[in-house]
Every structure is written in structure tokens, then in C-alpha cells.
Image (cartoon, rainbow, N blue to C red):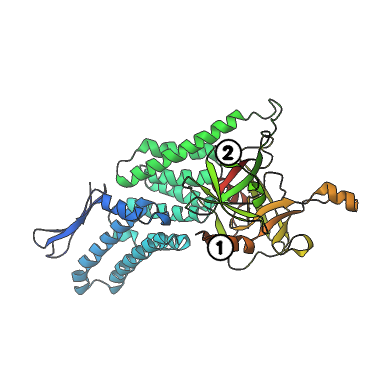
């Protein structure tokens, strides 16, 4: 289907095809300017795989940029005939906006992507043909940026608007399902992903959305099956497997690095994830109780570490892990609290004290701040029985985590390319929990 044709004076025709199969500039009057196929675009983007961009956004950002350039060329004679300078300036603004947004997506500057896409909607939609389609594409980019920023609640109404504007767009439903999924609303997420699949991949952009929806739906189905197999109260909970140790880790790089506690992996002949994927120890530090593992699979998400000002006394924290396997839920447990002290026992600055409840099996799990950024690694809880014997009082919620400075120094020494961001805005605990379920890993150790 022909999306846009505009004449550039005597230079010929510029044609963009909506199925993404061919982008061609030129005709017999002005010579051929070359072709770039969608396969070549895909190969180029695969070279930048680390950026984690959705392929379809770049395709359509390029199309929008070319359309705006086309319009700006076509406006030149009209401007000379009296068209207002403001109109021509708007066209130039939109051209710059699309280029800046493409660059921001490449560098994963998601807050900037959201801001630029909103500016694009405010000033540029009336300049292009097929307004509804262009609005849906802009909403798609806003939703993507909000999800990457962890603002899942904000992303939902944006995706719902996308569905309203263009109900036959699979990518709108895929965006909606992604936000719902990260909030733990599995039933609603399933419906959205199924709708995307039913619409079908009638062009390259929607085909990508359909494939993403299928993958996400498969993961949701497995989670639902696991829940069905767990029937609370039907029988006595089974104890952990005899002879094994258990802990938690979390993914910190796209290369499959997993961070955990040294005491979780100490004395282990073999290490594996709960679903049997092997893990290998590549670095350890007994002093800070940290260990770095290598997985043989590519992660779908990785943790983001806090940078900028250090956490303050009394700041909210969220812990996540897989405590008491065989007794508690296998999907992981989240607990909230505060930063009780910026040092550990006897003022040990390698650790911090937290009030978030933890149990055996939480060791090695991530500790998040209120923005969903990692600020430590859960390491231990105070032995209440021993303290009670010594003091006559039972301590409540006295737990510890490895200090962020220790964690980042350990990763830097190991050469791990981890992500970091400044914590600026609070995120709902439910959103932090949804992120944690994607990056946390249950670890089994066979001594």
C-alpha cells in the first residue's frame, strides 16, 4: 500500500511503502538514488543489539523523517509565494524532532524519547497524511519509553489511546499487554497479547509486535501453569530438597552476568537456576560477600543500578528474593521497609541495615530504592535467638545488605557493563516488584 507520494518540483517522486519492503528515492527524470531494503535495516540494527531498541520504532522514525523532509522540500516554493514563516519553521522543527528521537532511542534515553514524542504529537501530526496512523506510532513510542522508565501505570492509558486511535494495530495491543504484564495483571495482559496476535502481522511493524506478543504469552502461560500446580492448603508444603542450598541472584548485564552472595555459592560442586540452567562462578569476594556468575542464556531484562546521590537514612527500600523454597511461593517474595542505618554491625561500612523482612533464601537478592534502582544486595538477617539469649530482648526486622559502593566496586573490578541511572521519581512498589520478577533468579547449589 502506498503511504505517501509527494512531488519535489522537477526532481521526481519520493515514495514510501507501508509494508516496509522497499524505500526508494528517485525516478527516470532525476536518476536513481539507491535502495535500502528492510533486511538491510534489520542487519544494521542487529549490530546495535546492545541498545535493546524495538526494530519497528526505528523503521517508522525513519519513514517519518523522510516524509517530513519531503514536505519541507515541497514547502520551499510555497513559502516563497507567501506562506507564513511559522509553517516552514514547524516543518523544520518536526524534522529535527524525528532525528533527535531516533538518536535518543538508540542511546536508550527513554525520558527524552517520551518528551520528544509528545512534542511530535503536539506540533507535527497535521503535517503528515494518515493522521491516525502517525498518532498511533507516536503513542507507541511514548508507551515504550514509559515502560522502559518503569512507569507502567502511566503507560496503560497511553496504550489504550493507541488502541482507540488505531484498533487494527497489533503494536498498540502489544504495548498495552507489556505494561499490564509488568504490573502483574496477567489475565488482562493475556487478553491484550491475544488480541495483538489475532490482528496479525499484516506489515513488518505489526509482524514484530505479533512475535513479541507470542513470546510474552508463552511466558505468561508457564507462570499460570506453575500457579495452578500450587494448591495452597491442599497438602502439607514439601521441605526443600535435601542436601541442596538455595539463594537468589539477579541479572546485571546483557551478557548474562548474575550477581549474588559469596556464601550462596561457597562449597558448591554445581550451580544452576531453578529450571536447571547451569551457572558458572567467574568472580568472588569473601570480604564483601559477593559473587559473580555466568549464565548460558540471554536475559530479557537486566537490573539498573542507582547513580548520583547515595541513599539516605529513612529512605524506602524494597527487597526481592526466593525465600524458603518448598514452603513459600515459587514466584518470589517482595517486602518493603526503610534504610534503617547506613552501616552494618559495629559500624561496618561495607553493609547497610534495612527493615524489609528477609528469610533464608533471600540471600543474594536485589535491594531496590523507591525508583526501582538497585542500591544493594541482601545478605543476612540478625540471629534473633542468639541476640535474645544475650540481651533478653528479641530484635525485630534487623536485616542487612551489601552497600551499593561495595557492589559497584566489585562489578567494576570484574569489568561488568552494568546499567545505571539517577533516581529521580518514586515508582509504585507493584512496578518495582514486576521489574524484580524479570531480573531475579532462583539459585540452587549442590554441595
Q: Residue at the location (71% across, 27% down)?
A: 236
Q: Residues within 10 Å of mark 1 (few under 14, many from 20)?
A: few
Reply above or below: 243 against 145: above
- Closest to the camera, between mark 2 and mark 1, is 1
Reply above or below: 184 against 426: above
Q: Position of residue 291 (x, y in %)?
A: 61, 53
- Tag 2–tag 1 contact (CB < 8 Å): no
Q: Position of residue 135 (x, y in %)?
A: 37, 54
Instruction: Tell me: 369 left or right of 301.
Output: right
Residue nearest the viewer, comparing 332 with 445: 445
Instruction: Tell me: 309 left or right of 354.
Output: left
Q: Residue at the location (49% across, 40% down)?
A: 189
| Secondary structure under the numbered disc 2 in the rendered image | loop
Residue nearest the viewer, comparing 186 with 229: 229
What is the number of the mark on residue 413? Answer: 1
Residue 5 visible somewhere in the drawing: no
Q: Quadrant of the C terminus?
A: top right
Amino acid at each position: 500500500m502506498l503511504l505517501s507520494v509527494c512531488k519535489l518540483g522537477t526532481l521526481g517522486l519520493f515514495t514510501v511503502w507501508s509494508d516496509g519492503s522497499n524505500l526508494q528515492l528517485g525516478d527516470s527524470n532525476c536518476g536513481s538514488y539507491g535502495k535500502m531494503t528492510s533486511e538491510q535495516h534489520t542487519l544494521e540494527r542487529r549490530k546495535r543489539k546492545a541498545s535493546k531498541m524495538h526494530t519497528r520504532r526505528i523503521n517508522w522514525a525513519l519513514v517519518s523523517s523522510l516524509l517530513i523532509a519531503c514536505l519541507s522540500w515541497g514547502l520551499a516554493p510555497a513559502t516563497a509565494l507567501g506562506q507564513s514563516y511559522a509553517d516552514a519553521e514547524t516543518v523544520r522543527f518536526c524534522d529535527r524532532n524525528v532525528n533527535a528521537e531516533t538518536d535518543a532511542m538508540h542511546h536508550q534515553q527513554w525520558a527524552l524519547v517520551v518528551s520528544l514524542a509528545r512534542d511530535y504529537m503536539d506540533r507535527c501530526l497535521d503535517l503528515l497524511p494518515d493522521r491516525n496512523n502517525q498518532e498511533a506510532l507516536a503513542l507507541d513510542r511514548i508507551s515504550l519509553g514509559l515502560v522502559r522508565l518503569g512507569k507502567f501505570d502511566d503507560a496503560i492509558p497511553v496504550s489504550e489511546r493507541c488502541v482507540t486511535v488505531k484498533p487494527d494495530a497489533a503494536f498498540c495491543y502489544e504495548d498495552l499487554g507489556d505494561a499490564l504484564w509488568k504490573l502483574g495483571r496477567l489475565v488482562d495482559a493475556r487478553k491484550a497479547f491475544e488480541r495483538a496476535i489475532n490482528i496479525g502481522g499484516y506489515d513488518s511493524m505489526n509482524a514484530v509486535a505479533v512475535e513479541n506478543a507470542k513470546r510474552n504469552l508463552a511466558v505468561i502461560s508457564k507462570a499460570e501453569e506453575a500457579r495452578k500446580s500450587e494448591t495452597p492448603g491442599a497438602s502439607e508444603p514439601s521441605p526443600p530438597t535435601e542436601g541442596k542450598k538455595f539463594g537468589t541472584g539477579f541479572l546485571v548485564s546483557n551478557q548474562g552476568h548474575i550477581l549474588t552472595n559469596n556464601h550462596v555459592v561457597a562449597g558448591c560442586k554445581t550451580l544452576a537456576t531453578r529450571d536447571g540452567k547451569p551457572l558458572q562462578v567467574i568472580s568472588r569476594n569473601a570480604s564483601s560477600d559477593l559473587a559473580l556468575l555466568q549464565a548460558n542464556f540471554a536475559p530479557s531484562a537486566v537490573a539498573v543500578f542507582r547513580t548520583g546521590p547515595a541513599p539516605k537514612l529513612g529512605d524506602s527500600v524494597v527487597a526481592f528474593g526466593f525465600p524458603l523454597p518448598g514452603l513459600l511461593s515459587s514466584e518470589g517474595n517482595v517486602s518493603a521497609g526503610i534504610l534503617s542505618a547506613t552501616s552494618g554491625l559495629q559500624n561496618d561500612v561495607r553493609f547497610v541495615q534495612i527493615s524489609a523482612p528477609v528469610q533464608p533464601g533471600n540471600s543474594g537478592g536485589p535491594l531496590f530504592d523507591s525508583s526501582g534502582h538497585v542500591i544493594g544486595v541482601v545478605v543476612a538477617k540478625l540471629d534473633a535467638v542468639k541476640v535474645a539469649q544475650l540481651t533478653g530482648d528479641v530484635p525485630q526486622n534487623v536485616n542487612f545488605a551489601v552497600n551499593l559502593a561495595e557492589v559497584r566496586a566489585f562489578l567494576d573490578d570484574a569489568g561488568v557493563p552494568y546499567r545505571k541511572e539517577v533516581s529521580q521519581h518514586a515508582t509504585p512498589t507493584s512496578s518495582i516488584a514486576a521489574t524484580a520478577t524479570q531480573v531475579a533468579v532462583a539459585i540452587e547449589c549442590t554441595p
